[in-house]
Image (cartoon, grey):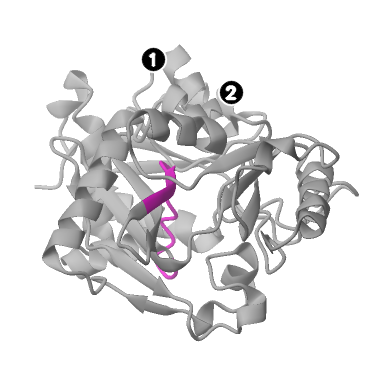
């Protein structure tokens, strides 16, 4: 098949405006991820056309006219940027992998996602949305410590050692930073003490939970914050221990698996997604978020790592994602080379 790979690449040097955060490009993919996916698809017999999701994306995609788009693009700007590429492809009637524009928009909006989870009875930390630091009445019912995040970001953007706050003074300072640099309301959550888990889901009929992974931050100095912040990922990831499969008893594993699958289905995710879960001391799996565009970095990505533990090579993982997308489009199913034989 003729496959376009839609992506956004991290720039070699960050060029930032004065009011932009230092992690502006944290979501974008390094060259090795783009090269690895391209190589995997080519080794499966496909002709691959990498296209960066920039302002000329529409022109480029029309020029190439692919059979399907393998989408890992984060989009350019805006609160619903992850839905930009899927929306363009829907408009043009071009098949693509991954979730649709609605799911992409909802899952990037953390408060909306959490409200849906609450309605569905899925555990998620209690929260409030704060649009100005002078008005903190919405957080009065929450218990410290709290964690302060941007409302519409992924990849641990806006999270560092100062994100966990223990007083209204610290909360106000952190909310001010989120509003100033990320130009959006702050999501304020109760911080759940406990274990940090990540859950990968692959496929559709039915979706399959990959081996659950635990991130152990006990080796990280307490003053840095023992959670998956952007700061830890960028500077101190070597201090984090990774256990896959996570040491969980069978009943707890099944509960986490079922909660994760419910989130995947309720939010209408497709093909792949990864959840962040905080397991409280009483064994409750609190869903922090779900990412329908999980990192596919062959070296550092949690999703490929969980697939490896399952016994899948990187090539097999990419093929499984592709086939999950192809299965939605009857005209592609019988194309020569649409599936590895």
Is the residue 64 above or below the residue 20 in the image?
A: above
Q: Is residue 44 visible?
A: no
In the image, 26 versus 335, the foreground residue is 26
User: Dot 2 corresponds to which residue?
Assistant: 59
Cα distance in 3D space between marks 2 and 1: 15 Å
Give, as a single range, the part of the protein colored magenta: 286-300
Q: Residues within 10 Å of mark 1 (few under 14, many from 20)?
A: few
Q: Which mark is residue 93?
A: 1
Look at discs 2 and 1 and give the one toward the viewer.
1
> Which of the 4 image quarters holds residue 216?
bottom left
| Residue 304 image point, x, y percent | 33, 61
Please report the residue visible at 54 percent of the width from the left and 59 percent of the height from the top: 31
| Residue 302 image point, x, y percent | 38, 63
| Residue 260 image point, x, y percent | 28, 46
- The mark tally for this picture is 2
Is the residue 151 above or below the residue 89 in the image?
A: below
Please report the residue visible at 76 percent of the width from the left and 40 percent of the height from the top: 136
Please report the residue visible at 35 percent of the width from the left and 45 percent of the height from the top: 273
Is the residue 219 above or below the residue 33 in the image?
A: below
Residue 187 painted magenta: no
| Residue 270 image point, x, y percent | 30, 34
Instruction: Find numbered disc 1 in the image and state the secondary structure of the residue it sits on.
Output: loop
Please report the residue visible at 20 percent of the width from the left and 46 percent of the height from the top: 258
Residue projecting furthest to the left:
341
In the image, 43 versus 214, the foreground residue is 214
Q: Is residue 162 left or right of residue 45?
A: right
Instruction: Find numbered disc 2 in the image and state the secondary structure of the residue it sits on.
Output: helix
State if disc 1 and disc 2 touch (CB < 8 Å).
no
Q: Which mark is residue 195?
A: none
């Amino acid at each position: 098949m003729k496959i376009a790979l839609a992506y956004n690449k991290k720039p070699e040097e960050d060029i930032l405006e004065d009011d932009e955060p230092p992690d502006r490009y944290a979501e974008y993919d390094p060259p090795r991820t783009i090269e690895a996916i391209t190589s995997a698809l080519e080794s499966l017999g496909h002709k691959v056309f990498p296209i960066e999701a920039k302002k000329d994306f529409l022109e480029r995609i029309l020029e190439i006219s692919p059979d399907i788009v393998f989408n890992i693009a984060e989009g350019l700007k805006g609160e619903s940027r992850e839905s930009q590429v899927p929306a363009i492809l829907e408009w043009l009637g071009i098949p693509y992998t991954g979730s649709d524009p609605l799911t992409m928009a909802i899952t990037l909006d953390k408060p909306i996602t959490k409200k849906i989870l609450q309605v569905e009875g899925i555990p998620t930390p209690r929260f409030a949305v704060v649009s100005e630091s002078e008005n903190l009445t919405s957080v009065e019912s929450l218990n410290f410590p709290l964690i302060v995040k941007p409302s519409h970001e992924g990849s641990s953007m806006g999270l560092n050692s100062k994100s966990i706050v223990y007083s209204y003074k610290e909360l106000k300072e952190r909310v001010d930073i989120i509003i100033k640099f990320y130009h959006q309301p702050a999501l304020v959550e109760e911080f759940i003490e406990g274990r940090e888990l990540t859950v990968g889901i692959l496929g559709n009929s039915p979706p399959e939970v990959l081996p659950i992974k635990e991130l152990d931050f006990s080796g990280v100095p307490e003053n840095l914050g023992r959670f998956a912040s952007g700061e830890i990922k960028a500077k101190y990831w070597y201090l984090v221990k990774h256990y896959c499969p996570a040491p969980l008893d069978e009943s707890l594993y099944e509960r986490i698996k079922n909660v994760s699958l419910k989130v995947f289905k309720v939010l209408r995710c497709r093909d792949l997604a990864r959840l962040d879960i905080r397991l409280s001391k009483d064994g409750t799996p609190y869903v922090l978020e779900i990412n329908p565009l999980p990192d596919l970095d062959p070296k550092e990505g949690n999703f490929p790592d969980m697939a490896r533990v399952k016994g899948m090579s990187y090539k097999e993982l990419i093929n499984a994602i592709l086939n999950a997308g192809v299965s939605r489009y009857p005209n592609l199913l019988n194309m020569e080379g649409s599936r590895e034989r």
